[in-house]
Amino acid sequence: MKIEKTSSPSPASTVGDAKARASTTAQTAGNKSAATENSGTSVHLGSTTAQLRSIEGSIASTPVVDTHKVAEIKQAISEGRFQVNSGVVADRLISSVRELIAASQR
């Protein structure tokens, strides 16, 4: 079953990636401070960096699952009101498979 998402998930990272980024960041910070001390040059990344960090924080805090919708569906199932439209399920399953095939051929 395909569940509609309100936002795209942030990319998954592995422990090795995080360690590599941390060491790269530490090296870069060390190089920047050495360069700043030696040449008196400073770096300003601008307001775009702050905006990107803000967006990243809001994406990270966005829930992946709509718990209210899940609760409504559970309630409907328990009360016997939930009806499955097999035609819609089949159409969306076929659509999902077509998307996967198209993505794998790229």
Image (tube, grey):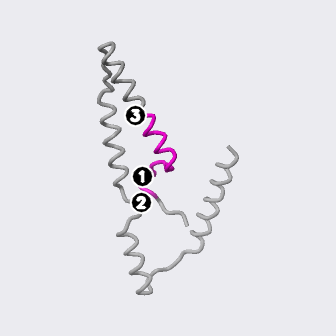
Q: Residue at x 55, y 74 (%)?
A: 85
**Residue under pointer 3:** 26
- Residue 26, placed above or below residue 36: below
Q: Nearer the viewer, residue 86 or 26?
A: 26
Real-space Cα separation, disc 3 to disc 2, in angstroms: 32 Å
Real-space Cα separation, disc 2 to disc 1, in angstroms: 8 Å
Taking the view exactly as shown, the residue that stands out farthest to the bottom is 79
Earlier in the chain: of badge 1 and badge 3, it is 1
Q: Toward which corner of the image does residue 55 lie, by quadrant?
A: top left
Q: Secondary structure at mark 2?
A: loop
Indicate the position of residue 80 as horizontal and vertical percent values: 44, 86
**Residue under pointer 1:** 7
> Is 53 placed left or right of 88 in the picture?
left
Chain part drawn in magenta:
5-26
Q: Toward which corner of the image does residue 76 lie, by quadrant?
A: bottom left
Q: Nearer the viewer, residue 51 or 14?
A: 14
**Residue under pointer 2:** 64
Q: Secondary structure at mark 1?
A: loop
Earlier in the chain: of badge 2 and badge 1, it is 1
Please state which amino acid type lies under the numbered disc 3: Ala
CB under 8 Å between callouts 2 and 1?
Answer: no
In front: mark 2 or mark 1?
Answer: 2
Q: Residue at x 38, y 69 (%)?
A: 69
Indicate the position of residue 106 as horizontal and vertical percent values: 67, 43
Q: Secondary structure at mark 3?
A: helix
> Is 19 placed left or right of 40 in the picture?
right
Please state which amino acid type lies under the numbered disc 2: Val
Q: Residue at x 30, y 19 (%)?
A: 42
Taking the view exactly as shown, the residue that stands out farthest to the right is 105
In front: mark 3 or mark 2?
Answer: 3
